[in-house]
Amino acid sequence: MPNLIRFTCQKCGACCKVGGYVFLKKGEAERIAAKLAIPPEEFKKKYTKKYIKWIFGYCTSLISSEAGVCIFLKNNRCMIYDARPEQCSSWPYWKKILNNKTDLMLAKLYCKGIE
């Protein structure tokens, strides 16, 4: 049974500054491109990177700044909030965090919105 957590977003952008990958699901690149009012192919070329996944093909993620910050975080606000990927909108209710006390503790270190 997963740990129950309470979360209130503090709008601090800390979750966008941690580093790591924001993987895109099918249709998310097109949705973000529409939000930015650019063609999907331009969005993919400018803002995404493909990674090879062992025998399963590839996956696509958003690129990050050189500092590891999400490319769409400006002044601690998400520029694509209404079209953000599911990985972002489901934070911090990820199975890895809900089912693992160590991962929950680590998430609490940088996310002050998790109780």
Image: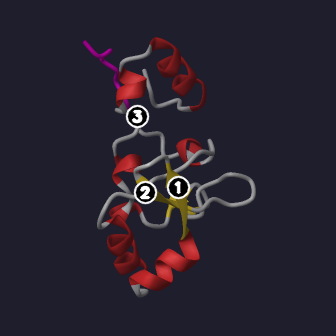
Q: Residues within 10 Å of mark 2 (few under 14, many from 20)?
A: few
> What residue would you read off at disc 3?
92
Q: Looking at the picture, tell me which residue is in the foreground, 62 or 70.
A: 62
> Is the residue under label 1 in contact with that under label 2 (CB below 8 Å)?
yes
Which amino acid is tagged 2? Gly
Mark earlier in primary sequence (3, 1): 1
**In this rendering, is residue 26 above or below 98?**
below
Q: Position of residue 111 (x, y in %)?
A: 53, 32
Q: Position of residue 63 (x, y in %)?
A: 59, 62
Tell me the residue at 46%/58% (across/down).
58
Which residue position is annotated with label 1?
Answer: 52
Q: Chief secondary structure of the magenta span?
A: loop
Q: Residue drawn 42% across and 20% down?
A: 115
Q: Which amino acid does the dot numbered 1 rest on?
A: Ile
Q: Give, as a single range, the part of the protein colored magenta.
A: 1-7
Separation of residues labelled 3 and 1 (CA atoms) = 26 Å
Residue position marked by numbered label 2 in the rendering: 57
